[in-house]
Image: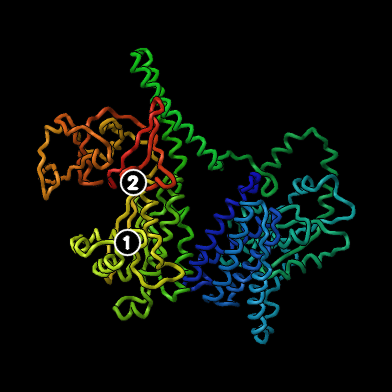
Amino acid sequence: MVLVSDPTSTFVQESQEDIQQLNNALLDLENADDPENSDSIETVFRVAHNLKGNFGVMGYTDASEIAHAVEDLLDCIRSGELAVTGERMDLIFSGVDLLDRMVQEISEDGETETDPEATIEEIRASIDDERTDGEDDAGADESAGNAESLGDVSSGRDVPLEALSEEIDAELPADADVYRAVVEFEETGSEHVDAMFVIDAIKDEYDLVGLEPDSATIEDGEFDASFDAYVLTDPDVSTDEVAAFYEDNRYVDAVAVSQVTDEIAAERTETDEDGDSDGEDDASTTDSGSGFAHASQEVESIRVDVEQIDQLYNQVEEMVTSRIKLRKIVEENELVEAEDELEEHGKITASLQDTVLEIRLVPLKKIVGNFPRVVRDLARKQEKEIDFQMDGVDIEMDRSILNELGDPLMHLIRNAVDHGIEPPEERERRGKPREGTIKLIGERDRDRVSVTVQDDGRGLEVEEIREKAINQGVLTEEEARVLEDSEVYDLIFHPGFSTTDEVTEVSGRGVGMDVVNQVVRGVDGSISVESEPGAGTSVTLMLPVSVAIVRVLFVTVGDETYGVPIKNIDEISELEDVTIESVEGRQTVTHDEQVYPLLSLGERLDVPTDEPSPDDMVIRITESVRQVCLRCSDVVGQEEVVIKPFEGVLSGAPGISGASVLGEGEVVMILDVDTL
């Protein structure tokens, strides 16, 4: 991947955001009861216009042309020439997909090599075919696109002579004229979009030297459906020719054109005679003019490369590790006088750490914004009717976690479409609405986030899963029969296990759910399944909000030291203070009439230990995490540490969430009590 310049990097980011917004607006348009008059048509035009203009400004002509073709097809829909159909929307979406691909190429190589000609011709042909079919009916209305001439009607806005004279370099050229056009638009609710199309056309034809109000005001829709445009022309261009240019534009409702060359020339002469003595006054006067001078603005936000944020976070991690080393030195050498400074250092580090973690938070919608489009395309391919809903996607999570979460969530969505939602005819036979529903719901609870994908489709058949698990050799018949329903659902995460006999383009190959489980576990998350046959399935991912800088309790097992996240611990007791009983050959501890299995860390981690001692410690884990107690040799303190997750073959290893480097370079494994 090559490094791109800052303007290109900004352009890529903005274009990606625009394309996602365009995709979602097109979906709203496709589902609208009255597409031509829906709010989404205005959004579609505004975003499509931005894309076309931005591609043109950056010099990506091919991309600008495909955006222009899409824009023209959408305009035919808005004007009522073409109806919204699935086939036409497929054509528009294909153009948007091409733009997305070209932006990706620009991001990677700084340029695009994709040839959009075939797609452009297909879109243009769709427009031309429809217009050819309608020629017989169009004759009577052929002039409907021509604007009305306003004659000498004025907009009521004064000609900004001083600003115009300064806008035109040096003195007004002798071989050029300046024309003023008062342009009016029909108030349709999207007149600002029409106005931006006209402004683009003006720039293509003439040298636009003035606009009142300015283009930003017009684009925001904060104008009275009219503007004054000032253009430079060759001396052989007549007023009628300039007027005809505007009148032939389909977006213009009415126009009045007049030449203001002499007025501006006179203003230029008067300004030259005044000299520089009134410079300060002139500056203040110009600043108050609308459309030609721009007041300075404070910078309220900046774009920062994610690599810089990652680098800053790595430096914070080093500070945390350094603090651990300092504390150990202070304690070992009894440097009492350094304790206050170390405490202050700790506060500063903690504050910086919190700030950096906040900066790294990204809304969930950043990775699920394209899901509505994915569901739409899959549903059309499988001839299913699906209402896809998203809620709570503004919740924020650390960027590194979200990056890992994209593919698992996509797999769950595709599974819901492919396996969950039934064809319309089957749903009707079952007494369900023809249209199925898939929901993606995000919720935050303190330092954890839940993301749920649920559907109202077929649901999971517990007995069917048992039989398949037996037939595929995952479990013996005896083992399968004693499983609770919730444990049966967990079988779908077994590598190679599949609940479908049919292999499709979407799923059915026995891969995916085990990978989903592995990825979620790798970011210190968990996954659970709830289902009801005939009613639907719900898959919930529980994930941390931020990356793992956590306070852990250090415990010893034989000669080894491990860390247990303190947030997962309810109570620490000496072995002699708890009552241990044997239930079906397994040691248990009872607390508040609840029975907790007692796990020996030595046995679970295969660490050589001495015989169990009365001095051993028992750690009771929070019930919401896992109803279990852990037995260890000793508890040796606690500290805030940086947890580095394992990669490669160690990623997702049961019982271990990662490792941390302590003061003297000692590496300590951090336990994942949920999978231990």
The figure's colour scheme reads rainbow
Q: Quadrant of the C terminus?
A: top left
Question: Which is nearer the eye, 305 or 151?
Answer: 305
Residues marked 2 and 1 touching at CB (< 8 Å):
no
Answer left or right for 77 relative to 179: left
Res 501 quadrant in image? bottom left
Disc 2 to disc 1, C-alpha distance = 24 Å
Image: 475 above or below 131: above
Mark 1: which amino acid? Answer: Ile
The front one of 648 and 70 is 648
Q: Is residue 431 above or below residue 456?
A: below
Name the amino acid type tagged 2: Arg
Q: Which residue is mark 1?
A: 492
Q: Residues within 10 Å of mark 1 (few under 14, many from 20)?
A: many
Q: Please identify the residue farthest to the bottom as the structure is shown.
A: 136
Residue positioned 35% across, 31% down in the render: 640
Left or right: where does residue 78 sit relative to residue 395? right
The image's mark for residue 448 is 2
